Structures are given as C-alpha cells and as structure tokens.
C-alpha cells in the first residue's frame, strides 16, 4: 500500500503558513473523501476520481491550507468533526472509506419460518445488518413472564472463522478486502428451546454502493450558549439568559423536506439534586407555532452517544420545514428533585407472619410523617423474588423515599412511580436470600421532594436559508388533517349528539376504566370501572372488555347487566357486523397472542391462527375476518383474511410503512379501507384490503386510537407530544369533512357509534 503521509518539509511549510495542528493520516483520508463527495454533489454519493498517491498528498494539504485561510481554523475543525453522512433508514454512517451494501436480499425458510436479510451497510466503523423474521408460531414463545427464551446474539462470520460481534446498533466492521460473510442467528430471540429452528446461516455478498446512493450531509455544530431557564410558568415569565448550554443542537441533517436535529439536554442541578423531565420536549418557531416532530429511529446509536458520560439525555427530532420562521426554540420541562432532610428517618412495623407466601398482601393504610411530609403505606405484598413490595400514597411534593427492613440485608431491589409526578404514588421493593418473617421493623429515610417547575430552552437556526422548500406547500392529495389544520376544526354538529363514543380514561376514582359518552360530551356513563381493551357493539348497545380475571365480559349499556363468556381470555376485541361474534387475540394457558373467534351466546372459542403477536383488523360485510401478523424486526406487517365458512386463510399484502409498535389497524364497515398508524407513530394511512391506493390521511398529528362507525365516520384519538393531552376527531375521508369532539373526551377512543 502506498504511503500517503506528507513529507516533513512540506508539512512544516504548511504549518508555518497557516498555524494549524498537524494533520494525521485518518484526518487526511477523511477530508479527501468529504471534499470529493461535496464537489460532486450536495446530496448524492458519486464515484470518486482517483489521483496518483504523490498527487493525493499535495492535493489534500493544499485544499486544507486554502480552507483554513478562507474559513478559519475553528470552522475547519467543526467541518472535520462532521465527516459523516446520513442514509435514511440506516442512520449516520462514516464516509471516510467507500461505503458497501448488500448485493441482494437473502432469505432462508425452515419449518414455515422465514428469515430475510433485507439490507446491509458497511462503513469503516461498523457493519449494519437489517433482517426480519416471519412465521414464528405463538407456541414457540414463553407463556409466562418469569420464563426466558433464547438470549443468544446473532453475529457475522467471515471465511477464516472470525466472528464479528454486535457494537453500537451494528456489528464490528467487515475488512475492506472481504466481500462475503455469513450472518448467523443461533436462535430466534425469546423462543423456547426446541420450539423453532436454530442455527440459522445466511450467506451475504457485499458490493460498492452505487453512485446514486442518497447520503445526506451531517453538519456538526459547536455548542453555543443560546439557552434560557424559566422558573414556574414559562409562558408568563421572561427567560433568563445563562452562560452554559443545557439544551444544545450538536448535529444537523438536511432532509428533502426539512431537518433532523440531534442534541443534548443536560440540566445543571445543585450538588445532591437531580432533574426529572416531565413530558416530551417541544419545538416552536419564532412566530410561536408549535412544530410537530417525529423521533427518527435510525439515529438511535447517535442518541446513545450524545447521552454517554453525562447526567442528561440525548435527543433527536425530525420535522418538515416549509413555512417555518427562525430561530426555533427547543424546550424541556421538568423539576428538580432534592432531599428534604438527609437525617430524617421514621420506623413502622408490620407482622408478616411465620410463613408468608408469594402474592400475599397486607393493606395497613397507615399514615407516616417524614421530614414534614405525609406518606401513606397503602399495601405491602410478597413478590416472587423472595422479597416485599411496598406501595405508598404521598402528598404532591413527595417524589420517593428509601425503604429498609431493620436487621436484614437485601440482595436486590427497585422501585418506581415518581410520587407527586405520577398520581401521588410510588413503590419500593426489596429482595433477600431468605425472606424475612415475623414482626418486621421498616425504616423510611432519604425522602426526596419535588421542586418548582423549570423549563430549559435552546435556540437553533439553519446555517443557510433553504431555497428548495415552498413557503405554502400544496397539500398532498387525500390528506385531510395536519397539525396546523387541527386547531381550525369546528365542534361536531348537533345532529351527531346522539352518537356514542367508548372512551378508556382515568375515572374520578383515580383508576382507569371505560365510559360511554354522547358525542356532545353529555350523559357520561361509566360502564366498566376497572377493565380495558373495550369494544362497542355495532349498534352501540353493548360493551365487551377484558377483565382482570382474563375473561371477556359483555355489559349491556342501558341495564348494566353483565355476561361473562366462558373460557375466553384476551385483548384486541372486535365485534362482527351482526353483533353475534367477537374476534380477539388470546393469551394465557400456553397461548401467546394467537387469534380466536367466540360467539356471544357462549359457544367455545375457535382458534383461527397460530402466528405470534397478531392484531385483529376487523370484519368485512361478507363475514371474512381480516388480521395482521408482524415481522420480527422492521415495521412490516402481513395482512390476511380468514373465511369462517371454509376455514381458509388468504394472504393479502404487506404493510411496509406501519409503526413497529402498535399498528392499530381498523377495517371500514363497508370493507373498502384499512386505516393504520404510520411508521412515525403519529400519522394515519388508508389502504384498500388488496394493498392498492395507499395514501396519507392524517399527517403527524399523534394518531393513537382508531375506530370506524358503521356509517363510515372515522374517529381518531390524537395524543399530543405531552401524553396527558388528548383530542378526538371525526373524519369522513372521502371528502375530508372533519370535526373536533368535546374536550371532556380526553382518553383513548375504543368504540364509535353514529346513527
């Protein structure tokens, strides 16, 4: 290999001329690659031209010297730090060496299970492999949380036997002179031994990336002190400028329609204090407009790097930039957590008896005063880890406290909640090698309390104005609702007042349950005080729900009489159009997320699919049941229909742009459209059941709950960036007629009836 290092004499002349640090070989190669790519295209990676080695050195050092003289040493160093590119769906990649890709997808099928490597991206620093699995039966997974399945990690194996392990959301880099490897999956994640094929091997071949591969520049920024701290209500108080940078934008990616910002949030608390973020961060432009954003999953590794070695967190936001007014303000809200009195402690006792058993519970409801605050011990229970769990109800200023059983040393423990930040509750657990018994003395200490609300803010503007974005973009065909148009919606007309909505919400009792409202917000009726996964019958007269006894219950809304379907248990309930059957996803007793249908007259349930982690879409007018099953990995879902008469299943198409989390697909009553949540976990799409005419109907509005009425109205509950905020809208997609439902309806929409 030729030595590309510059001669000492030449370097000395350059240093004397421009007074910059010595360039090392990696710097030289990186800058060369970047300059070649930028010269060829701002947005594409093109095949570089090549110089003879002797001329490469002169070319690079000359360009470096000219760059420093023109733009200054600090800006050159900032540019050097940004010698990376962004590939949509892959993430940020190192461009200091040629990028290689998977030559073609590779699939292997065994026992009805298919593993497919869909793509691979090879850079100097790592290898990223995207793969997905389909067809794993539910019976291959554990049916209880305390049972663990396969935990072995996949790896790449080279021809000489070298194994490349996982690192930073990828694998160790494949050497530049190696163009083949085998992707090895020892066993499918979380499957039980012997329940699914093991030792999968997929041969991969790599080629140079084509010249038209889209790679967007990643601009690294030096932190600047554009930060403000607002105590209390930030909307009514003037920000106070600070000298540090608690909210920073560290990387910027210019996308085709906007930006991806990557940064850090590192609040500076006093010694002994900590900071608790409350809600998602917000972005608004200089006109005060709140900007809807999504979280770009393909930059997870960068977020982790931003979070490493600090007390704060990394953050990222992707948004559309047309019509925005700069600068943008990024704000994080939260509170300081600090000790009330480090020396304060208090004791109480409870009698666990001579032989306490897992699941046993005591409800002392004892109030205790600690450091001037009241803590109520609501329950103490024995858990399965040889320990005790303590549940507390506290006043709004309390965050948490330490729990200790006098005379016993725990070997583990935990807790959660957040006190006044989470419904005034927190819990603490202790586990032991041998469970303590008898009369136990419990010490409470280290009470942590919640300070006043604080908002940290930082600002960002693009380095150069965008000329490729329209000030008033033309709405996409079929798009009915955006974050901007949401505020303009009118209330539903009085003609809809007699319609009904089933809402899963926090009730006045503090528990979560199901309530039926008229669509004008009147005549609230709590039908299920402690159930979930509700479904409103097609005529609005009955509610089916999943109960804590793992059964399916049916409540008559008018009479409040209740019927329990024998042997049924599951979630994701869907009524048939005639109200005589319910499809659901069953679990328990060896069943993991498989699809069942049960009649409402009590006939035993019928299993119609044994795939894993399925979701019901709905019933077509001709009685077919539509459902989806997810691929393991990625965001793809395979759509099926099942004919209950013939007992046959038909594969329809694959949804490639859905959310990998909770797709929540729903079939329209006429059987013409499937509504589902998009990959950004916020938008809503419609598609025909054969996979045709897919289009965006709600764009980045926080779509969560989705329901159709039998008259063709589409109801969607929208969750704001702060999850406590909720709005429910009604839409007729074919004409985009849309209304806002009353603000009283603040939960998740789980049923809709409009006469």
Image (tube, rainbow, N blue to C red):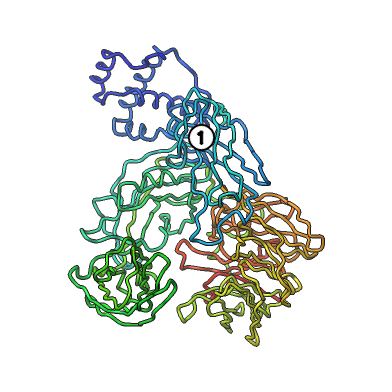
Which residue position holds label 1? 156
Is there any visible trace of residue 579 in the rendered image? no
| Residue nearer the viewer, 246 or 166 | 166
Q: Quadrant of the C terminus?
A: bottom right
Q: Nearer the viewer, residue 543 or 346?
A: 346
Residue ID at (33%, 68%): 233
Look at 45% across and 46% down and name the residue there: 300
Instruction: In the rendered view, tell whether residue 580 sits above or below residue 17.
Output: below
Q: Position of residue 496 (x, y in %)?
A: 66, 77
Task: Estimate the x, y position of residue 606 in percent, counting from the top left.
Answer: 72, 66
In the image, is residue 132 above or below residue 366? above
Q: What element does badge 1 sit on?
A: strand
Quadrant of the image occupied by residue 343:
bottom left
The x, y position of residue 685, in whole percent, is 63, 56
Q: Does residue 245 appear anywhere in the picture?
A: yes
Which residue occupies 54% across, 30% down?
Answer: 181
Question: In the rendered view, would you say 645 is above or below 262?
Answer: below
């Amino acid at each position: 290999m030729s030595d590309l290092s510059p001669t000492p004499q030449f370097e000395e002349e350059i240093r004397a001329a421009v007074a910059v640090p010595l360039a090392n070989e990696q710097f030289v190669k990186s800058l060369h690659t970047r300059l070649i790519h930028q010269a060829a295209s701002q947005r594409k990676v093109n095949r570089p031209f090549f110089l003879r080695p002797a001329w490469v050195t002169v070319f690079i050092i000359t360009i470096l010297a000219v760059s420093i003289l023109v733009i200054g040493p600090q800006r050159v160093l900032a540019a050097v730090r940004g010698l990376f590119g962004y590939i949509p769906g892959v993430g940020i990649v190192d461009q200091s060496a040629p990028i290689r890709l998977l030559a073609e997808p590779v699939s292997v099928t065994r026992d009805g299970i298919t593993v497919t490597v869909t793509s691979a991206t090879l850079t100097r620093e790592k290898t990223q492999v995207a793969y997905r699995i389909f067809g794993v039966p539910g019976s291959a997974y554990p049916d209880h949380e305390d049972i663990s399945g396969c935990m072995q990690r996949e790896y790449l194996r080279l021809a000489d036997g070298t194994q490349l392990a996982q690192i930073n959301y990828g694998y160790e880099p494949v050497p530049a002179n190696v163009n083949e490897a085998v992707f090895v999956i020892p066993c499918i994640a979380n499957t039980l031994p012997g329940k699914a094929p093991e030792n999968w091997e997929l041969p991969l071949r790599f080629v140079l990336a084509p010249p038209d591969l889209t790679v967007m520049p990643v601009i690294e920024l030096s932190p600047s002190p554009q930060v403000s701290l607002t105590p209390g209500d930030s909307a009514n108080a003037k920000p106070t400028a600070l000298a540090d940078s608690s909210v920073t934008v560290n990387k910027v990616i210019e996308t085709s329609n906007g930006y991806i910002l990557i940064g850090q949030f590192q609040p500076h608390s006093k010694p002994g204090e900590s900071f608790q973020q409350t809600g998602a961060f917000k972005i608004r432009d200089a006109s005060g407009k709140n900007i809807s954003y999504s979280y770009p999953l393909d930059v997870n590794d960068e977020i982790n790097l931003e979070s490493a070695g600090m007390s704060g967190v990394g953050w990222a936001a992707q948004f559309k930039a047309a019509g925005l007014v700069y600068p943008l303000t990024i704000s994080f809200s939260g509170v300081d957590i600090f000790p009330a009195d480090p020396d304060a402690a208090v004791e109480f006792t409870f009698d666990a008896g001579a032989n306490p058993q897992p699941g046993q519970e005591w409800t002392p409801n004892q109030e205790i005063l600690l450091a001037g605050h009241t803590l109520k011990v609501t329950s103490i229970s024995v858990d399965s880890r040889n320990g005790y769990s303590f549940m507390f109800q506290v006043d709004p200023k309390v965050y948490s406290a330490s729990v200790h059983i006098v005379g016993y040393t725990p070997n583990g423990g935990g807790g959660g909640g957040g006190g006044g930040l989470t419904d005034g509750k927190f819990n603490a657990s202790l586990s032991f090698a041998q469970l303590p018994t008898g009369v136990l003395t419990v010490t409470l200490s280290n009470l942590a309390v919640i300070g006043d609300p604080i908002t940290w803010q930082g600002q960002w503007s693009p380095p150069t104005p965008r000329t490729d974005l329209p000030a008033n973009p033309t709405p996409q065909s079929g798009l009915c609702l955006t974050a901007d148009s949401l505020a303009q919606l009118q209330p539903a007309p009085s003609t809809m007042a007699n319609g009904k909505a089933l809402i899963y919400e926090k009730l006045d009792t503090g528990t979560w349950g199901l309530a039926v409202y008229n669509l004008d917000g009147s005549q609230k009726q709590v039908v299920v005080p402690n159930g979930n996964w509700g479904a409103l019958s097609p005529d609005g007269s009955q509610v089916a729900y999943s109960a804590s006894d793992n059964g399916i219950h049916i409540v008559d809304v008018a009479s409040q009489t209740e019927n329990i379907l024998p042997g049924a248990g599951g979630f994701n309930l869907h009524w048939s159009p005639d109200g005589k059957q319910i499809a659901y996803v069953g679990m328990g007793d060896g069943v993991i997320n498989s699809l069942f249908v049960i009649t409402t007259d009590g006939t035993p349930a019928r299993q119609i699919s044994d795939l894993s982690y399925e979701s019901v879409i709905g019933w077509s007018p001709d009685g077919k049941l539509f459902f989806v099953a997810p691929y393991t990995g990625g965001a793809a879902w395979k759509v099926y229909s099942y004919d209950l008469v013939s007992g046959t299943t038909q594969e329809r198409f694959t949804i490639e742009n859905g959310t990998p989390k909770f797709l929540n697909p729903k079939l329209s009553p006429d059987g013409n459209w499937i509504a589902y949540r998009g990959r950004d976990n916020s938008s809503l799409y419609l598609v025909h059941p054969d996979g045709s005419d897919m289009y965006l109907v709600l764009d980045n509005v926080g779509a969560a709950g989705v329901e159709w009425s039998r008259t063709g109205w589409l109801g969607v509950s929208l969750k704001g960036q702060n999850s406590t905020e909720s709005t429910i809208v009604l839409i007729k997609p074919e004409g985009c007629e849309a209304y806002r439902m009353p603000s009283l309806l603040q939960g998740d929409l789980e049923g809709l009836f409009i006469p």
